[in-house]
Image: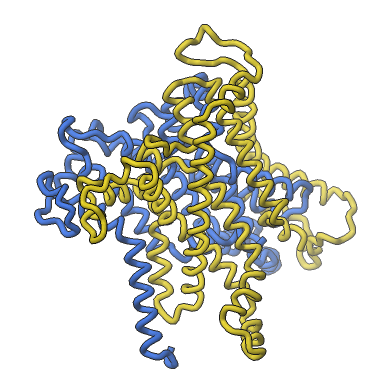
Amino acid sequence: MKGDSPRARAGWTAAIIVVMFYALIPVLWLVSLSLKTPATVSDRKFIPQSTTFDNYTTLFSGGLDSPLLRPLINSVLIALIATVIAVTLASFTAYAIARLDFPGKTVILAGALAIAMFPPISVVGPLFDMWRALGLYDTYPGLIIPYLTFALPLAIYTLVAFFREIPWELEQAAQVDGATPWQAFRKVILPLAAPGVFTAAILVFIFAWNDFVFAITLTSSDRARTVPAALAFFTGESQFTAPTGNIAAAAVLVTIPIIVFVLIFQRRIVAGLTAGAVKG
Amino acid sequence: MSTSAPTQVGEPAVSAPRRGRGGPRQTSDRTKAERKLGLMLCAPAIVVMLLVTVYPILYAIVLSVQKVDLRFPNESGFVGLHNYGAVLSSPLWWQDVGNTAFVTVISVVVELILGMILALVMHRALFGRGLIRTSVLIPYGIVTVVAAFAWFFAFDPSSGFVNSLPFIADDKAWFGERGSAFTVIILTEIWKTTPFMALLLLAGLATIDEGLYEAAKVDGANAWQRFYKITLPLLKPALLVALLFRTLDAFRVFDSIFVMTRGSQDTESVSILGYNQLISRLNLGLGSAVSVLIFILVLAIAFLFVRGFGTATPGSQGEKR
């Protein structure tokens, strides 16, 4: 750093600013729109001339019948449940693949990879039909099941990559030192495995939070509709008010958790995203 | 995972044999038990994945050779390959395949170039690497539908700021015409997914031995030669994996088109076509034929990458080490 010329530093600063600007401008535009009053929403100005929080408060007026509250609850619960199940199942599988010797590992990994590439639209029709027959259409499980399935490959690859790095000998070493198997697992292996499990959980959550195709095809009402699907079907309070401000406000609200996630866990997210793909 | 710990019991801990992958293979009770445990641990995930992907795609094939229209439930019956004939002879299908291929190719190529530049910048960053990483992770994390709305509102002629920029007509209706609508759709795709590409390439760059560059510098190679002769060949595995994933992902393009045009102005993708047939028109037979054809196209792309370019399946080498 000391050897850097001022010109090089200026160049880097410019590059950083360009990248940040490009990455953030649509988000800033949403924030700006969400704060504008109906009279100024079409003024095309980046800084709101008059600000209001009405766009946010109307999203929640009316409690559970409000435009956003129910979808927001649905989104959080569905994504959380899918994450817990997917990460649990993936932990079993990844542990076996990383640690145990048994035939068919390559087949399992290849199969998981094939599913990662699978086009969701190809199963939407059959699932729509099956879910209606099974009573899962427009319910939480109806979305949780496809989410956890399509997130499993990502979770398995991330966890296998992490688990392979764990020095499992420590578990035996702890037992030599007199720890019971459970203590060895809890005090030695669990702390080592936790970051990987947590990383997989973040990636699965982002996947489930983001989905749109399943959310609009397998739901028909606010019973199970998640925020992305609800956003796409937003309508204004009357047919004369475009819901631009409301959509922008809702978009900002669902983006905040993601930005917080990213800020706190960015190292983990990057490690998880790249662990499976590059080590191979 | 707690259930797996007791397998250690009874093993003489001191002389614990390392589970040698190349060791003598005798099917002792110990290895049998390990195999059984391994398969049992994998079973739940395998069952779920088979039930929710393989079974539905087989069901889709069954539906695709029947007339199943939920609006006319009494007219169901076996029709052979009639649905496929109807799809393949329709100009709309070919138009949508062309649209999807167009969006895929343009966005993946631009992402590759931008992602590579971004990865090199982050790799060589003098300072502020964390700041760049944080900012590029935001597009990655944002819900695709939200990203689509953000760009839609930015380009919207009535409220967007884009039309007030210099050199752009004040009343340009971006979504009223095919070319400009595709421009915004592709821009959204690129904005959203370049970070993913950049991060994968950055991880690939980190695996390259810096000594190679030093040696090449000593031998008088310039920056371009170093990139072309060292970086590119060594980055090839990471590059191909990133390309494969992004190509298949881009081929499924749905969210941004749904939000921005719903497929009007001839901007429909194959996924939108499938959705319209299945969900809007409730024509499960015809829609399933579309689904199966999309599945075959995706298989063909994956096959082309693996066989044509020699993309290694991630994890496959890890198995052999």
Structure colour scheme? by chain
**Looking at the picture, how far across and down is residue B300, in whole percent?**
66, 42
**Looking at the picture, how far across and down is residue B214, in whole percent?**
62, 87
Q: Nearer the viewer, residue A79 or A274?
A: A274
In this image, B52 relative to A3: left or right? Answer: right
Quadrant of the drawing holding the C terminus of chain A: bottom right
What chain is the yellow one?
B
The residue depicted at 49 percent of the width and 69 percent of the height is: B117
The quarter of the displayed image where residue B280 is located: top left
Quadrant of the drawing holding the N terminus of chain A: bottom left
Would residue A111 be seen by someone viewing this image from the given angle? yes
Q: Nearer the viewer, residue A231 or B43?
A: A231
The residue depicted at 44 percent of the width and 64 percent of the height is: A266
What chain is the blue one?
A
Would residue B144 be seen by someone viewing this image from the given angle? no
The correct choice, above or below, for A1 with respect to B169 in the image is below
**Looking at the picture, how far across and down is residue A65, in whole percent?**
24, 31
Seen as rendered, the residue at the extreme top is B74
The residue depicted at 14 percent of the width and 45 percent of the height is: A54
The correct choice, above or below, for A76 with respect to A127 in the image is below
The residue depicted at 30 percent of the width and 56 percent of the height is: A27
The correct choice, above or below, for A259 with respect to A228 in the image is below
**Looking at the picture, how far across and down is residue B106, in whole percent?**
49, 53
